[in-house]
Image (tube, rainbow, N blue to C red):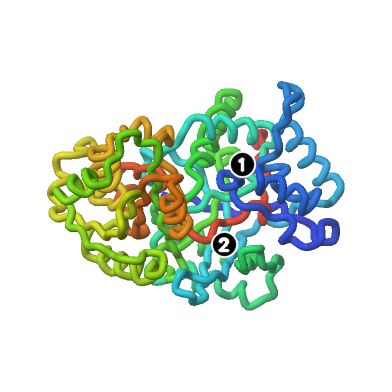
């Protein structure tokens, strides 16, 4: 049973900070050092200083990115740069963006707190593996600041759109936040304090399973933090604020939900032979050639998308080939002898088939190397990937179709987890719209 709760959100005060577009930031895990510097230069109040501050050579236990974030957070609250809402609220959030088809889409959702649940409960389910490093980093931040600066991105199923209808009244008013970011994405936020509406929303969400789309490390960190605090909290009831975390909820049945693929570049294979690679591919895959891939990339991707509706297909361009190819798995049953420790839902994923049959078995890049990102690079832009192979910097580009949302659900329901970089939900939910304060005392 999913327990949704309102929060007294902490929001930026535009009278102190100016344009909110200079204050918000992408999720911390997609911020490069260059992007971090750009965000620092945008505004002294950019949320990156809280969520993902700079590190310096002189940092130590007493002075570091986490202590600086804590000091800034307290100072901004005291100076009115950040203001906490008086009444608990649910925050309705919409994003307008341009899809790859050139059409404008709107993704609707809401931001609230959710009661933390162990994955074994089946209430909140992950679909990706996590690494220890990011969880250590996030735990240090939450301990220092006792706040969630960015919401975890989650999905739920509501084909009748009852939750959307329930919250639609709020969007008839003027939003409390309204801005366009540098990527041309429009962001709008409304506040709902009506207790009757909030109660009805809680009732609608109570029987739903929640699937984590983005933010697995932050969710597991919230669990770890809660478990640490419980040890020093003898009268724990489960209603304390540290038993909740900040989450953005998106209806997976909404047409505005988009998943982009993440492509793979291969490099550093000392004995790579393009002819032998094609020969090995042909054992399990049909190969369809495409000439002049740069000029015909759009048609190539359209063909790949069409093939992907009914088959497991990938786009491939290898150094030494005179054309690109779409390769299609001949027999889905081929996977029955591989990854047998995983669910059928896992073994039927395009990304699993690619990594198992091709990257691991043909190219010899072990799972351990893949997890360490040795010999493999992840990329969003197809043309950039092609250029890297054509320029000789990389050896192979694999282009994938996006993972289907229902595949994410199927893997999560099977209590399984996808390979790294299986999904890229677009657009990302920025950090800094609503902040959740965690009170250890209650």
- Relative placement, left or right, of 187 versus 412 is right
> Can you identify the residue that label 2 sits on?
198
**Image: 29 above or below 430:** above
- Quadrant of residue 65 within the rendered picture: top right
Q: Nearer the viewer, residue 403 or 143?
A: 403
Q: Residues within 10 Å of mark 2 (few under 14, many from 20)?
A: many
**Image: 335 above or below 22:** above
Spatial CA distance of label 1 from label 2 is 18 Å
Which residue is drawn at the image coordinates 55% and 61% (left, top)? 110
Residue 70, x across and y down, in percent: 74, 36
Q: Nearer the viewer, residue 202 or 58?
A: 58
- Relative placement, left or right, of 169 versus 17 is left
Q: Nearer the viewer, residue 383 or 207?
A: 383
Find numbered disc 1 in the image and state the secondary structure of the residue it sits on.
helix
Total number of numbered discs in the rendering: 2
- Does the rendering let one see residue 376? yes
Residue 379, x across and y down, in percent: 46, 51
Find numbered disc 2 in the image and state the secondary structure of the residue it sits on.
helix
For marks 1 and 2, the one nearer the N-term is 2
Q: Which mark is residue 40?
A: none
Which residue is drawn at the image coordinates 65% and 37% (left, top)? 442
> Can you identify the residue that label 1 sits on?
241
Residue 114, x across and y down, in percent: 52, 49
Q: Residues within 10 Å of mark 1 (few under 14, many from 20)?
A: some
- Does the rendering let one see residue 193? no
**Image: 128 above or below 96:** above
Which residue is drawn at the image coordinates 54% and 41% (left, top)? 218
- Quadrant of residue 419 within the rendered picture: top left
């Amino acid at each position: 049973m999913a327990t949704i709760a309102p929060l007294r959100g902490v929001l930026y005060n535009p009278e102190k900070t100016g344009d909110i577009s200079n204050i918000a930031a992408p999720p911390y895990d997609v911020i490069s050092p260059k992007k971090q510097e750009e965000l620092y230069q945008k505004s002294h109040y950019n949320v990156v200083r809280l969520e993902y501050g700079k590190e310096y050579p002189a940092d130590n236990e007493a002075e570091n990115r986490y202590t600086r974030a804590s000091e800034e957070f307290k100072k901004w609250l005291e100076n009115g740069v950040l203001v906490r809402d008086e009444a608990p609220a649910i925050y309705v959030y919409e994003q307008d963006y341009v899809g790859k088809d050139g059409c404008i889409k709107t993704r609707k959702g809401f931001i609230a707190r959710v009661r933390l649940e162990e994955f074994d409960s089946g209430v909140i389910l992950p679909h990706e593996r996590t690494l220890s490093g990011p969880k250590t980093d996030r735990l240090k931040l939450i301990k220092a600041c006792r706040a969630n600066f960015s919401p975890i991105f989650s999905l739920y199923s509501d084909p009748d759109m009852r939750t959307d209808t329930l919250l639609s009244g709020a969007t008839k008013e003027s939003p409390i936040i309204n801005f366009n970011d540098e990527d041309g994405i429009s962001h709008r936020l409304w506040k709902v304090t009506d207790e009757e509406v909030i109660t009805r929303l809680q009732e609608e969400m109570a029987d739903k399973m929640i699937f984590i789309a983005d933010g697995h490390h932050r969710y597991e960190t919230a669990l770890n933090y809660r478990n640490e605090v419980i040890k020093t909290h003898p009268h724990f009831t489960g209603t304390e604020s540290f038993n909740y975390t900040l989450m953005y909820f998106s209806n997976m049945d909404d047409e505005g939900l988009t998943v982009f693929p993440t492509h793979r570049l291969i490099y550093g294979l000392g004995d790579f032979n393009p002819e032998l690679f094609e020969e090995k591919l042909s054992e399990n895959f049909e190969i369809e050639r495409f000439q002049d891939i740069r000029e015909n990339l759009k048609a190539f991707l359209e063909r790949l998308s069409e093939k992907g509706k009914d088959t497991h297909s990938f786009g491939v361009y290898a150094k030494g080939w005179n054309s690109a190819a779409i390769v299609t798995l001949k027999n889905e049953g081929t996977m029955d002898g591989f990854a047998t420790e995983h669910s059928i839902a896992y073994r039927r994923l395009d990304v699993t088939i690619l990594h198992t049959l091709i990257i691991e078995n043909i190219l010899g890049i072990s799972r351990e190397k893949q997890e360490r990102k040795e010999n493999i690079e992840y990329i969003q832009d197809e043309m950039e990937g092609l250029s890297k192979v054509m320029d000789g910097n990389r050896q192979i580009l694999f282009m994938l179709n996006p993972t289907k949302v229902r595949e994410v659900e199927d893997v999560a329901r099977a209590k399984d987890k996808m390979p790294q970089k299986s999904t890229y939900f677009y657009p990302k939910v920025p950090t800094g719209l609503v902040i959740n304060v965690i009170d250890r005392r209650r």
